[in-house]
Image: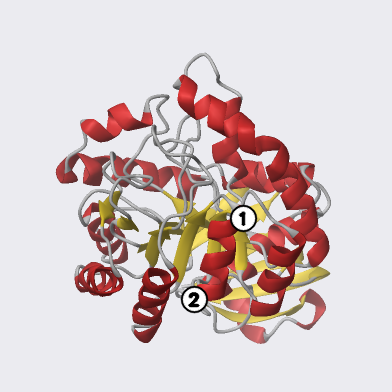
């Protein structure tokens, strides 16, 4: 089956061009170019007039927790979680991403291998949803952030960390997550507490990279961020404290920043429902987060879109909201859209998505207005295709 989208404004993940045509054949993009020079095959294809509309790659959310629903009491939800329940929740939540124009997600922690299996079921066509890259269980130190909920496993020592990485990969993990600092949602540990040692971080990164898996580091405090960056992680999640030194080193090393602003806003904007300890810690890092975001953008650090969906008042399918927050806090709409498409694909080592180019998978979103001009347009997709099929 062929589909031709005619005379559309195209954001291809890197540039914006007007009066373009895109020919889709099967699951891939067959041709992209000026509509006036469309190939003969375009005439035989099912046509869609894109006049006045904008076509973009499918969005990529690099930080989600599909097994969690965004309830106020995150820890309470985790206590009731079982792998079968996690799989059911993940199945429902995955569809919400697809409806929002998100065609690829990275799950960074859930019970057992539930989200890995949901990703496989999506790939096999059993259920609908974005493609899922899943980390299985996140790795945290004994008593560290996440030890009390179902998305992390406790592990100590370089050898044990290396073994844990291997075990998660054996279970099917296509990414690895390490918890390098404390966190907002874990009581009894400061958000900026530095966790894993230099040797433990190095072991995790070395092992994951030897298997071709990117490494995400949850890191809030400056010391933990810098240690993770120097260990060679691929992305820093949250990254709330960016000093000038951290900015320089992330820029030099090409370390991606996933600010997860939706997660912070969901906590601090709902103080009457979210547990008091989490609100207090969230407020403590809010000012630093705004300053750090501005510094990171100015320094030219690579950014991706990561919502941390599943945390309190942070529902699935919120990637457009995350992009809007990134712009509100100092990024241009063009840079935000690039973060949500091409940059995400590069981070996740998926060269087949994130761009509208011949040969890529046909993950596409059609908007009535241009999100590169007004980022709020990203919240109103008209049509979504994943691998050439209407979502």
Residue at the image position 30 percent from the left and 48 percent from the top: 151
Q: Position of residue 242 (x, y in %)?
A: 69, 56
Q: Position of residue 129 (x, y in %)?
A: 38, 53
Q: Residue furthest top?
A: 272
Identify the secondary structure beneath mark 1.
helix
**Number of residues whose C-alpha sits closer than 10 Å to that of mark 2, classed few (under 14), some (14–19) or many (20 or more):** few
Identify the secondary structure beneath mark 2.
loop
Q: How is the image coloured?
A: secondary structure
The dot on residue 222 is 1
Residue at the image position 47 percent from the left and 47 percent from the top: 97
- In the image, 348 versus 179, the foreground residue is 179
Q: Is residue 305 above or below residue 34?
A: above
Please tell me in which quadrant of the rendered image residue 365 appears: bottom right
- In the image, 143 versus 293, the foreground residue is 143
Would residue 11 appear left or right of 155 to someone viewing this image?
right
**Disc with the residue nearer the chain's start (1 vs 2):** 1
Please tell me in which quadrant of the rendered image residue 195 appears: bottom left
Q: Are marks 1 and 2 in contact (CB under 8 Å)?
A: no
Q: Position of residue 93 (x, y in %)?
A: 37, 42
Please tell me in which quadrant of the rendered image residue 49 appears: bottom right
Q: Position of residue 17 (x, y in %)?
A: 82, 70
The dot on residue 350 is 2
Would residue 135 appear left or right of 28 to someone viewing this image?
left
**Number of residues whose C-alpha sits closer than 10 Å to that of mark 1, classed few (under 14), some (14–19) or many (20 or more):** many
Q: Can residue 320 be seen here?
A: yes
Q: Nearer the viewer, mark 1 or mark 2?
A: 1
Q: Is residue 163 above or below residue 189?
A: below
Q: CA distance from mark 1 to mark 2?
A: 29 Å
- In the image, 273 versus 246, the foreground residue is 246
Q: Can residue 58 be seen here?
A: no
């Amino acid at each position: 089956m062929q589909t031709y989208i005619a005379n559309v404004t195209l954001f291809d993940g890197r540039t914006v061009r007007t009066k373009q045509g895109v020919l889709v054949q099967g699951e891939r993009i067959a041709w992209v170019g000026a509509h006036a020079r469309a190939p003969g095959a375009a005439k035989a294809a099912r046509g869609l007039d894109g006049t006045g509309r904008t076509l973009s790659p499918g969005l990529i959310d690099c930080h989600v927790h599909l097994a969690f629903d965004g309830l106020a009491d995150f820890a309470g939800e985790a206590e009731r979680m079982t792998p079968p329940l996690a799989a059911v929740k993940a199945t429902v939540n995955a569809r919400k991403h697809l409806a929002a124009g998100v065609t690829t997600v990275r799950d960074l922690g859930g019970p057992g291998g539930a989200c890995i299996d949901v990703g496989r079921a999506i790939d096999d066509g059993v259920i609908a949803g974005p493609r899922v890259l899943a980390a299985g269980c996140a790795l945290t130190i004994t008593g560290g952030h996440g030890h009390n909920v179902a998305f992390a496993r406790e592990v100590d020592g370089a050898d044990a960390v290396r073994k844990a990485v291997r075990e998660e990969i054996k279970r099917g993990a296509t990414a690895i997550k390490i918890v390098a600092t404390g966190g907002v949602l874990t009581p009894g540990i400061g958000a900026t507490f530095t966790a894993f040692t230099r040797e433990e971080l190095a072991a995790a990164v070395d092992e994951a990279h030897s298997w071709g898996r990117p490494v995400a580091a949850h890191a809030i405090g400056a010391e933990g961020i810098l240690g993770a960056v120097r260990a060679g992680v691929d992305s820093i999640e949250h990254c709330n404290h960016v000093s000038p030194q951290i900015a320089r080193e992330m820029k030099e090393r090409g370390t991606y920043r996933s600010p997860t602003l939706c997660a912070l806003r969901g906590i601090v904007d709902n103080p009457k429902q979210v547990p008091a300890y989490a609100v207090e810690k969230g407020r403590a890092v809010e000012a630093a987060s705004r300053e750090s975001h501005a510094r990171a953008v100015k320094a030219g650090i690579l950014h991706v879109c990561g919502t941390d969906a599943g945390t309190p008042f942070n529902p699935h399918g919120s990637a457009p909201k995350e992009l809007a927050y990134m712009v509100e806090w100092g990024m241009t709409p063009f840079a935000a859209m690039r973060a949500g498409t091409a940059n995400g694909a590069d981070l996740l080592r998926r060269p087949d998505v994130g761009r509208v180019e011949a040969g890529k998978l046909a993950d596409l979103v059609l908007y009535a207005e241009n999100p590169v001009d007004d980022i709020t347009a990203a919240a109103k997709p008209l049509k979504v295709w994943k691998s050439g099929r209407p979502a």
